[in-house]
Amino acid sequence: MKARAFSYFRAATIDQALHAHARAGDDARFIAGGQSLVPALSLRLQAPRLLIDITHIAELRGVRREGAFLRIGALTRHCEMLSEPLIAEFAPLLRAAAPFVAHPAIRNRGTFGGSVAHADPASEFPAMTLALGAEIEIVGPSGSRRVKADDFFVDLFETALQPGELITAVFVPLFKADQRFAFDELARRRGDYALVGCGMLATCTGDRIDDIRISFFSVGNTPTRVKGTEAALIGSSLGAERIAAAQAALEGDLAPPEGDEVPPAMRLHLARVLLGRMLGRLGAGA
Amino acid sequence: MIGFDESLLDDADETVRVRFTINGRKVACEVAPRETLVDCLRNVLELTGTHAGCEMGACGACLVQLDGRAVHACLMFTVQADGARIDTIEGLTESGVIADLQAEFHRRNALQCGFCTPGMLVNAHELLSQVTRPSREDIRDALSGNYCRCTGYEAIVDAIDAVAKARIESGGPT
Ligand SMILES: Cc1cc2nc3c(=O)[nH]c(=O)nc-3n(C[C@H](O)[C@H](O)[C@H](O)COP(=O)(O)OP(=O)(O)OC[C@H]3O[C@@H](n4cnc5c(N)ncnc54)[C@H](O)[C@@H]3O)c2cc1C
Ligand code: FES
Ligand code: FES
């Protein structure tokens, strides 16, 4: 239960962090909150030569408005997602998800950027970036780019990030007056990873849904947008019949893996129940 | 822009000097980068009130305060804490800020073997310094990452609930 020996470097700037990573021949890991990485090192699932501490890089901090987006710095801690007024106002779906992420002491250290980079398919925030249509800002040796959340999550713990690249911030489109959102998850115990969870963001005219994005987590190798289900809802209001149609469509969108402690049929059932509850609430305007 | 010394890569297990303020006292010690804070506290600084249970963030026995917030000492390396302020159960006890919690835990038998107790107290202290009037549900939620294998939790929740109410009656948090 002890990590293999490594060297430690505390970077003061992005350039320093990228440079150190390259010098270590990419046999290095960035450490942010460490709430996923430290257990992985202790269990020796990973054993890099160099650990690069990015938590003292000022450029990765802060939450602010930038045009039509809210820019959330990678180092924003989970506890700040709960307390920061700009998140509550302009990204309320993230505020709603935050209390479900781990336990209070883990929220004091864990970072939003770390959660998105780690891309655990059972994690709340990666799935919410999909529901929000967010964009992930990445910087690497060859410069900076922005990747849509839809293109970011590739496979199990695999993302568009290349070795040596850093997430600097996540850009979330500002929440608008004609939008509604919902978040919920089913877990055995509060703070545990969810058996199944979901976040959604709808744009409405009155009660009619003009557009909706629905994303599930804990249902497969990556956070998963359910496009067939979304299509079943667009253009109508949320009556019992529409909700039933969306629940039926869910079966075409999700294929939970076999060989898990939770059988696929049960996960799919839970997803259907959760979707029904959440659409009911969304329709009631809550 | 460099700031990175390449020779660092060759001596991975070489100790480095770390300075922090522990329980109000400035301390410097030599640690290997891979040494976790909980190991440093217990083995180097002999502050054994911080317990090591699962060493993977699941049980809450290793909680300490880092710059005033509760964190798991098993989920960070000592080097990361360079320059920080750390308060362990020993410091919180000496300063008296959790004396009422400790007395109430004692009075209500909210501990048996005591293994979980330092972590419970650190988390309870954090909760009560952030939420003045927590519901029992809030208390249970705050303790969701703390395992107790002895008490069944009820007495722990009772004790924290009682202290929260007593603090309100005596005119706010101490
Ligand atoms: C007991 C326990 C329960 C938990 N429960 C939950 C839960 O219910 N839901 C949940 O979502 N999470 C949970 N977590 C995980 C927690 O939320 C982590 O904080 C989060 O997954 C990772 O963020 P971090 O800042 O700690 O990243 P780290 O652990 O520091 O890093 C994780 C990975 O991301 C990389 N990385 C970090 N930051 C960046 C960046 N800016 N750019 C590029 N790469 C980067 C690191 O190199 C590493 O590979 C739990 C953790 C524990 C220990
Ligand atoms: S020892 Fe740190 S949480 Fe169990
Ligand atoms: S008192 Fe023994 S584990 Fe809690």
Image: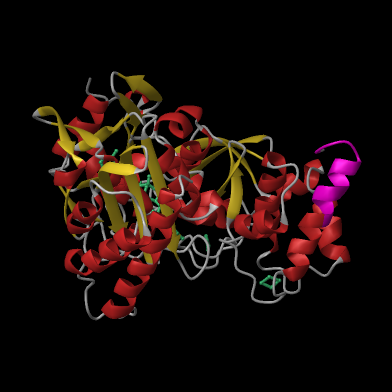
Could you tell me which residue is drawn at 23 percent across and 36 percent down?
A136
Q: Is residue A189 left or right of residue A179?
A: right
Rendered residue at 33%/78% (across/down)? A266
Q: Looking at this view, is A184 or B58 the one in front?
A: A184
In the rendered image, residue A177 lying in the magenta stretch gets the answer: no
Of residues B117 and A8, the one nearer the viewer is B117
Above or below, A215 against B170 in this view is: below
Residue at image location 14% in from the left, 37% down from the top:
A22
Q: Nearer the viewer, residue A237 or A194?
A: A237
Snapshot quadrant of residue B10: top left
Tell me which segment is drawn in magenta. B162-173
Residue B121 position (above or below residue A56): below
Applied colour scheme: secondary structure
Q: Position of residue B115 (x, y in %)?
A: 67, 68
**Residue A147 showing in the rendered view:** yes
Q: Is residue B47 above or below residue A255?
A: above
- The image quarter containing residue B169 is top right
Residue A124 in percent (x, y) is at 37, 52
Where does residue A43 sit, x and y in percent of width and height?
A: 35, 65
Front residue of A242/A112: it is A242
Q: Is residue B164 magenta?
A: yes
Q: Is residue A181 left or right of residue B21?
A: left
Pick the quarter of the image with the N terminus of chain A: bottom left
Residue for point 38% across, 63% down: A276
Q: Main secondary structure of the magenta part?
A: helix
**Does residue A223 lie above or below A29 as drawn?**
below
Count of marks, rendered view: 0
Residue at the extreme left: A142
Relative placement, left or right, of B48 versus A139 is right
**Residue A4 visible to an observer of this rendering:** no
Query: In terms of image quadrants, where is residue A7?
Result: top left
